[in-house]
């Protein structure tokens, strides 16, 4: 049986809520971003409510792709549709900034 986890949204200074990456498996996934010095920004993908198995994915984004971290690999393996939608969302956001 799968366990439910609650998404923990980033509210500390420096974090910005970018919006929703979409609804996957009945869960609305929200994207938070914190700019960093250098090429990479911190990104946290959070279930807006409860999700099975994992509700928080801390990742890094360089404007074109995500770093190959454990959260990336887990999302790719178990929620590939979310990863595809998230990547499209981030590219759209990045294109609108440039």
Image (cartoon, rainbow, N blue to C red):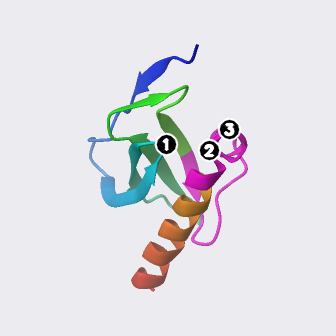
Instruction: Report the magenta residues as a range.
Output: 59-82
Going from N to C along the chain, the mark reached first, 3 or 2, is: 3
- Mark 2, residue position: 79
Q: Secondary structure at mark 3?
A: helix
- Find out whether residue 71 is within the magenta segment: yes
Residue at point 44% right, 31% down?
51
Of 8 and 81, the residue lying toward us: 81
On the rendered structure, is 15 left or right of 38? left
Identify the residue at the far bottom of this view.
98
Residue 71, percent across and down?
A: 63, 40
Q: Measure the C-alpha gap from mark 3 to mark 2.
A: 8 Å
Q: Measure the C-alpha gap from mark 1 to mark 2.
A: 9 Å
Report if residue 34 is visible in the image.
no
Report if residue 78 is visible in the image.
yes
The local crowd at label 2, few if under 14, some if 14 to 19, many if 20 or more residues have their Cα within 10 Å, is some
What quarter of the picture does the N terminus occupy? Answer: top right
- Mark 3, residue position: 74
Residue 3, percent across and down?
A: 51, 17
Residues tagged 1 and 2 counted as in contact (Cβ below 8 A): yes
Residue at point 68% right, 38% down?
74
On the rendered structure, is 21 left or right of 1? left
Residue 83's disc is none
The local crowd at label 1, few if under 14, some if 14 to 19, many if 20 or more residues have their Cα within 10 Å, is few
Q: Toward which corner of the image does residue 65 lie, by quadrant?
A: bottom right
Residue 25's disc is 1
Residue 96, percent across and down?
A: 41, 83
Check the image and report above or below for 25 versus 65.
above
């Amino acid at each position: 049986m799968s366990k439910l986890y609650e998404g923990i949204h980033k509210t500390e200074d420096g974090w910005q809520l970018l919006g929703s990456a979409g609804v996957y498996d009945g869960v609305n996934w929200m994207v938070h971003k914190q700019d960093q010095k250098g090429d990479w920004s911190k990104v946290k993908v959070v279930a807006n409510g409860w999700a099975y198995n994992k509700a928080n994915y801390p990742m890094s984004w360089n404007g074109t792709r995500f770093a190959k971290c454990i959260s990336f690999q887990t999302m790719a393996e178990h929620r590939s549709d979310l990863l595809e939608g998230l990547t499209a969302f981030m590219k759209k956001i990045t294109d609108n900034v440039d």
